[in-house]
Amino acid sequence: MRLGLGPIALAGTTRASLEALAKAAVAASFDSVWVAESRAGGVGGGLAAAAFLAQLVPIRVGAVLDGGLYHPLHMAEDIAIADVTSQGRVEVLLRGAPEEHVRLVLAALSGAHMRIDGPTLRVPARLEANQPAPDALLGVGVAAAWRAGTAAPAPSGRWPGMLLCPGDVAAADLLRAAGTAASYFLVDASSPENVRSAGWRLVGPLRMPGFPEWINQQ
């Protein structure tokens, strides 16, 4: 069971508030802290903000990126740089990304030679060593917005299904949504006080749920 803070909207957020929320997430025992860009609103820089936070806190950092509004090769380059500067602690959620863009990002991050001839994007294979990119969408998980009574998305490979949750969500509801799966929950919070409150309510019950009924049986 993983518990993240965010995503924190970068629109209208100051550097000081980002620092305060990230440090509160560490103190409240969150596994990660996330930021979200809004390129349609003129606010990008999700990966730059995540890389900045990675210099401040020891936990994982994530960025919600707007797919389709960001060239996938540039995105792959920025992800790689953020991954190096964070010492491998960066995570990425693509929002509204066409499948063609996702394939190109994954192919570019794989480090393999590639040739892409998609509906709208082409990466020409100029070298004989270049081969078509593999068809499999390896390393991709699924995220969904929280709704009362919903179930967390199914795991995909090594990635647990992710739910984006409101700040007042209850631990019991998250446990029901996860079922027997090891889900990943992102919990919204707008102030360090909200972060501490969410940590107090959620971290203990999610990480150390009650003993199963059979524990005391002979």
Image (tube, rainbow, N blue to C red):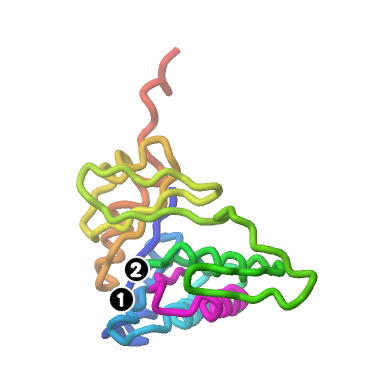
Please give the range of residues in magenta: 61-84
Residue 187 quadrant: bottom left
Instruction: Please name the residue shown 42% across and 43% down the image.
Output: 154
Residue marked by disc 2:
7
Residue 59 visible in rendering: no
Mark 2 and mark 1: span between their CA atoms?
Answer: 6 Å
Q: Is residue 211 magenta?
A: no
- Is residue 116 placed above or below 82 in the rendered structure? above
The 10 Å Cα crowd at callout 1, few under 14, some 14 to 19, many 20 or more, is some
Q: In the visual, does 22 lie left or right of 127?
A: left
Residue 91 visible in rendering: yes
- Residue 215: x %, y % from top left: 43, 23
Residue 173 quadrant: top left
Q: Are marks 2 and 1 in contact (CB under 8 Å)?
A: yes
86 or 215, which is in the foreground? Answer: 86
- Residue 121: x %, y % from top left: 52, 74
- Residue 16: x %, y % from top left: 35, 86
Instruction: Please name the residue shown 37% across and 87% down the image.
Output: 15
Q: In the visual, does 28 lie left or right of 60?
A: left
Instruction: Please name the residue shown 28% across and 59% down the image.
Output: 198
- Residue 186: x %, y % from top left: 35, 59
Task: Name which residue type carries label 2.
Answer: Pro
The 10 Å Cα crowd at callout 2, few under 14, some 14 to 19, many 20 or more, is many
Instruction: Please name the residue shown 35% across and 46% down the image.
Output: 152
Secondary structure beneath label 2:
strand
Q: In the visual, does 107 lie left or right of 12?
A: right
Q: In the visual, does 191 lie left or right of 133?
A: left
On the rendered image, what quadrant is the C terminus found in? top left
Task: Name which residue type carries label 1.
Answer: Ala
Residue marked by disc 1:
9
Q: Is residue 83 magenta?
A: yes
